[in-house]
Image (spheres, grey):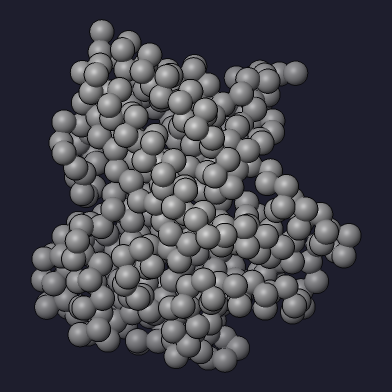
C-alpha cells in the first residue's frame, strides 16, 4: 500500500495541487496531507493504518461521527431504487418539511448541491427581489467561491493568503461592500450612506472560517435593525452553524430571525447538499413561481435526501446539542488549563458544537484583524505535533473545530493528554 506522501505525489500529476479543495493540501504546515482510507465514529484511519481522533468531521457534516449506521442504512435502503430521476420525488418534500419544522424562519426551501450554490442563489434572490445590486459581507467570512462573495473571504482563501481572487471582475466585486465583523457601528454608517441601494447583508452568524468567532452582543441585532429600516434582505449563512450551534442554528441560539438562510454540511449527512430558504414572499420570487432563475440537475438527489433526513432525525433527540456543547466545554477548558500550566498563551472560543483555538495573549478575538494577529507559527507546531500524537485538527489557524457526539470522554482525555505533551515541548 503506498504511503500518503507517495499518493500525494501521484495526485499532483493530474490534480492541481493534488487536491480537489485547497485547504486539504496542508499548505504552510510543512508536510504533505494525509490520505484517509476510512472513518468510523470519532476516528479517521489513514492509508498507513494509523488512527486519528478527528476534529474536522468532513468540515462539519459528521456531527454524530463518521459512518453513522443510521445514515448509512438510510442510503442503503434507497440505493436499489436508483440514483437520480430528474423528476420530483416524495423524499424531497420530507426534507423540506423537516427543515421548515426545525427552522421556523424558513417557510419555503430549495435544495442545491453545495453551500456555494446556496449562498450564490440566495444573493441572486435578494438582488432580484429588491431590484438592488449591492450586498454587504464581512471580512473573513467565507460564503463559498461564487464571484460576488469571493471578496475578502475566509477559510481556504485566507489560509492561502488570497482573500480576494483574480478572475472576479472588478465591475462585479464593486457591488460587494466588505465591513469588519462584529462592528455594529460600521454597519450603521454604511447603511446611513448607502442603505437604500443595498440588496442584503450576508453573514456567518458565528464566524467559522477565520477560526471560531461568535457575534458580540448586539451585532446580529444591528443587522436585523438596519435591514428592516432599509427593506434589505438579511441572509444568515448557516452552512456551518445550522443544526450545530443549536438544533435550530445560530438564529435559534441568538434569537434573531433572518429573511433567508443558507444551509449545507449537516443537512446532507455527508453527501453533497446545500439548501436556501426563508420568507415565503421572497422565496416565491424563485423560478418557476417567480422571475429569479435557479436550477440543478441533481438537486434534491434522493440518496442525499435520505442521508440528510436520517441525520436530522437523529440530532433532533432532546439533549443532543446540550451534550455536544458539554463535550466542547470539556475539550476547550482542558486545552486552556493545560496551556496555562505550560505557560503557552492560548485561548479558545466556542459556540455549541464548534470551537476555535487561538495562540494569542489577547482575551478574545472578535474580527479578522485580531484573528490574523495570532501566532501562526505556534499553530503550525501545534497542528503538526498533535497529528504525530494521533489528533487530526483542521490544517489551518483560520478554521473552526467540530465536535461530534461520537467523541467520548476518553477521546477528549486522550486529546488533552496529547496537548499537554505538545504544550510542554512548545514552552521549552
Ligand atoms: N458558507 C459557509 C459558512 C461555509 O463554511 C462554507 C464551506 N465551508 C460554504 C458556505 C461553502 O460551502 P461548500 O464548500 O459546500 O460550497
Quick check: can you spot residue 359?
no
Q: Is residue 188 above or below residue 18?
A: below
At horizontal 68% and vertical 46% (from top left) the residue drawn is 68
In this rendering, is residue 394 above or below 378? below
Camera-side residue of 286 and 105: 105
Residue 38 left/right relative to 399: right
Q: Position of residue 62 (x, y in %)?
A: 58, 47
Q: Nearer the viewer, residue 254 or 357?
A: 254
Examine the rendering and report whether any part of residue 130 can be seen.
Answer: yes
Question: Where residue 354 appears, x then y in whole percent?
Answer: 41, 47
Quadrant for residue 148, please give it: bottom left
User: Which part of the image, by quadrant, shows the N terminus?
Assistant: top right
Q: Position of residue 319 (x, y in %)?
A: 49, 56
Res. 45 image quadrant: top right
Q: Name above or below for residue 92 compared with residue 288.
A: above
Give the quarter of the image for residue 313.
bottom right
Residue at the front extreme of this rendering: 318
Q: Nearer the viewer, residue 11 or 330?
A: 330
Q: Residue at x 54, y 35 (%)?
A: 408
Q: Residue furthest top?
A: 428
Residue at the spot 67% in from the left edge and 78% down from the top edge:
93
Left or right: residue 258 compared with residue 364:
right
Image quadrant for the C terminus?
top left
Q: Residue at x 74, y 66 (%)?
A: 302
Amino acid at each position: 500500500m503506498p504511503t500518503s506522501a507517495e499518493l500525494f505525489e501521484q495526485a499532483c500529476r493530474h490534480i492541481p495541487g493534488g487536491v480537489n479543495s485547497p485547504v486539504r493540501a496542508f499548505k504552510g504546515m510543512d508536510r504533505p496531507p494525509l490520505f484517509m482510507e476510512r472513518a468510523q465514529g470519532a476516528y479517521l484511519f489513514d492509508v498507513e493504518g494509523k488512527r486519528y481522533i478527528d476534529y474536522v468531521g468532513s468540515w462539519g457534516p459528521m456531527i454524530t461521527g463518521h459512518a453513522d449506521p443510521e445514515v448509512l442504512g438510510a442510503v442503503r435502503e434507497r440505493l436499489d431504487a436508483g440514483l437520480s430521476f430528474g423528476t420530483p420525488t416524495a423524499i424531497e418534500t420530507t426534507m423540506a418539511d423537516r427543515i421548515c419544522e426545525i427552522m421556523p424562519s424558513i417557510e419555503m426551501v430549495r435544495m442545491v448541491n453545495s453551500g456555494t450554490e446556496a449562498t450564490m442563489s440566495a444573493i441572486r434572490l435578494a438582488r432580484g427581489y429588491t431590484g438592488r445590486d449591492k450586498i454587504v459581507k464581512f471580512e473573513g467570512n467565507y460564503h463559498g467561491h461564487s464571484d460576488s462573495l469571493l471578496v475578502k473571504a475566509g477559510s481556504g482563501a485566507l489560509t492561502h493568503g488570497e482573500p480576494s481572487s483574480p478572475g472576479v471582475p472588478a465591475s462585479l466585486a464593486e457591488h460587494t461592500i466588505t465591513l469588519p465583523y462584529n462592528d455594529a457601528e460600521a454597519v450603521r454608517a454604511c447603511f446611513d450612506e448607502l442603505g437604500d441601494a443595498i440588496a442584503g447583508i450576508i453573514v456567518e452568524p458565528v464566524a467559522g472560517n477565520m477560526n471560531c468567532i461568535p457575534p458580540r452582543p448586539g451585532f446580529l441585532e444591528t443587522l436585523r435593525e438596519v435591514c428592516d429600516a432599509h427593506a434589505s434582505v438579511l441572509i444568515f449563512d448557516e452552512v456551518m452553524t445550522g443544526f450545530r450551534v443549536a438544533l435550530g442554528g445560530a438564529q435559534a441560539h441568538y434569537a434573531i430571525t433572518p429573511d433567508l438562510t443558507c444551509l449545507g454540511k449537516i443537512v446532507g449527512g455527508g453527501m453533497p447538499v446545500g439548501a436556501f430558504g426563508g420568507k415565503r414572499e421572497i422565496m416565491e420570487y424563485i423560478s418557476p413561481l417567480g422571475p429569479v432563475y435557479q436550477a440543478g440537475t441533481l438537486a434534491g438527489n434522493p440518496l442525499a435526501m435520505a442521508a440528510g433526513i436520517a441525520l436530522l432525525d437523529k440530532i433532533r433527540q432532546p439533549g443532543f446539542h446540550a451534550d455536544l456543547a458539554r463535550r466542547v466545554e470539556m475539550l476547550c477548558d482542558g486545552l486552556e488549563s493545560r496551556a496555562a500550566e505550560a505557560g503557552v498563551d492560548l485561548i479558545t472560543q466556542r459556540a455549541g458544537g464548534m470551537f476555535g483555538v487561538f495562540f494569542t495573549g489577547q482575551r478574545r478575538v472578535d474580527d479578522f484583524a485580531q484573528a490574523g494577529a495570532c501566532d501562526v507559527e505556534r499553530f503550525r507546531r501545534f497542528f503538526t505535533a498533535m497529528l504525530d500524537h494521533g489528533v487530526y485538527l483542521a490544517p489551518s489557524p483560520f478554521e473552526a473545530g467540530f465536535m461530534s457526539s461520537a467523541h467520548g470522554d476518553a477521546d477528549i482525555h486522550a486529546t488533552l493528554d496529547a496537548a499537554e505533551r505538545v504544550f510542554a515541548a512548545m514552552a521549552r
